[in-house]
């Protein structure tokens, strides 16, 4: 008999804790790539991260300064509106709280914008309080271009379309301005636990 068992036992995966899976989602070990356009490849010496808009004084960090900022490594679950969820993903990056430390603003919303033109809108309170990061490593390795490298926004408590890949900045806005998918009928907020997939949900 072959020493390699092809029985069901070896392939069985532990069932995910259902309390970690939002309604209508299934758990996958894969990491699908979902991009609305081509993958940009911005050289690091042309990369910077900017916070501007309704702020007292805009700030910008070139790559070297950005990765020298205090960073955090977090393990979080992510949930795509196309119904896959991935548990225990590990990211290293700079907390948005850290980036906003010296930014004076009365704005309550942000638009994250990316190389390639993608945008997504978020309430400031959804990206502060230890709930959002500009991540440049995934699973201990530099973030791959397909998944948003050199750096992407990670906002795990909202559907993953809010986690802008190839992110280059945050524009603070006094009013909420719909981003790319929000303009195409996706929900403005996108809480997976409330199944806020599309406008009207
Ligand atoms: N710049 C940019 N960011 C993006 C997207 C995109 O098309 N462009 N797609 C969003 C969507 S719909 C999802 S589900 C996730 C997918 O991230 P992944 O390709 O790393 O799985 O990125 C989000 N961020
Ligand atoms: Mo998505």
Image (tube, rainbow, N blue to C red):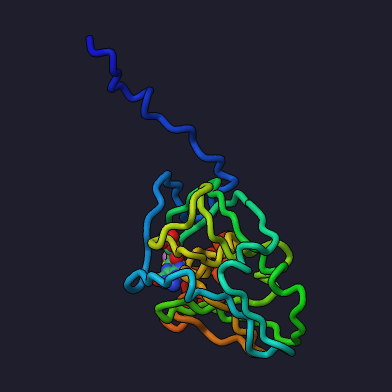
Describe residue 99's horizontal placement relative to residue 111 as left or right: right
Residue most toward the left? 1
- Residue at coordinates 57% horizontally, 75% vertically from top-left? 49
Instruction: Determine the image quadrant of residue 193.
Output: bottom right
x and y percentages locating residue 113 in the rendered image = 51, 79
Image coordinates of residue 83 in percent, x first then y, are 43, 57
Residue 8, picture quadrant:
top left
> Measured from the top left, where is residue 60 in percent x and y?
62, 79
66 left or right of 37?
right
In this picture, is 188 found above or below 196? below
Q: Residue at x 70, y 60 (%)?
A: 70
Q: Nearer the viewer, residue 108 or 70?
A: 70
Front residue of this view, candidates 20 and 32: 32
> How many numbered badges does the structure rendering display?
0
Q: Tell me: residue 7, above or below residue 16.
A: above
Does the image show residue 81?
A: no
The residue depicted at 58 percent of the width and 74 percent of the height is 62
Residue 63 appears in the rendering: yes
Q: Residue furthest top?
A: 1
Whereabouts is ligand 2, in terms of quadrant? bottom left
Q: Quadrant of the N terminus?
A: top left
Residue 180 x/y as whole percent: 44, 80
Look at the picture and state if 183 lies above or below 77.
Answer: below
Write the residue at 72% across / 67% down: 98
Between 18 and 31, the residue placed more toward the observer is 31
């Amino acid at each position: 008999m072959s020493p390699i068992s092809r029985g069901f036992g070896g392939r069985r995966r532990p069932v995910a804790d259902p309390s970690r899976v939002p309604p209508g989602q299934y758990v996958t070990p894969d990491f699908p790539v979902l991009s609305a356009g081509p993958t940009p490849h911005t050289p690091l010496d042309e990369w910077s991260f900017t916070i501007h808009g309704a702020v007292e004084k805009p700030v910008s960090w070139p790559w070297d300064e950005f990765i020298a900022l205090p960073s955090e490594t977090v393990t979080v679950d992510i949930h795509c509106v196309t119904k896959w969820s991935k548990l225990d993903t590990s990211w290293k990056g700079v907390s948005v709280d850290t980036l906003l430390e010296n930014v004076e603003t009365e704005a309550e919303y942000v638009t994250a914008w990316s190389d390639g033109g993608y945008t997504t809108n978020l309430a400031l309170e959804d990206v502060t309080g230890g709930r959002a990061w500009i991540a440049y490593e995934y699973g201990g390795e530099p973030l791959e271009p397909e998944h948003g490298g050199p750096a992407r926004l990670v906002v795990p408590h909202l559907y993953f379309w809010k986690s802008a890949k190839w992110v280059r900045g945050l524009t603070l806005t006094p009013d909420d301005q719909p981003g790319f998918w929000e303009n195409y009928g996706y929900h403005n907020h996108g809480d997976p636990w409330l199944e806020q997939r599309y406008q009207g949900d």
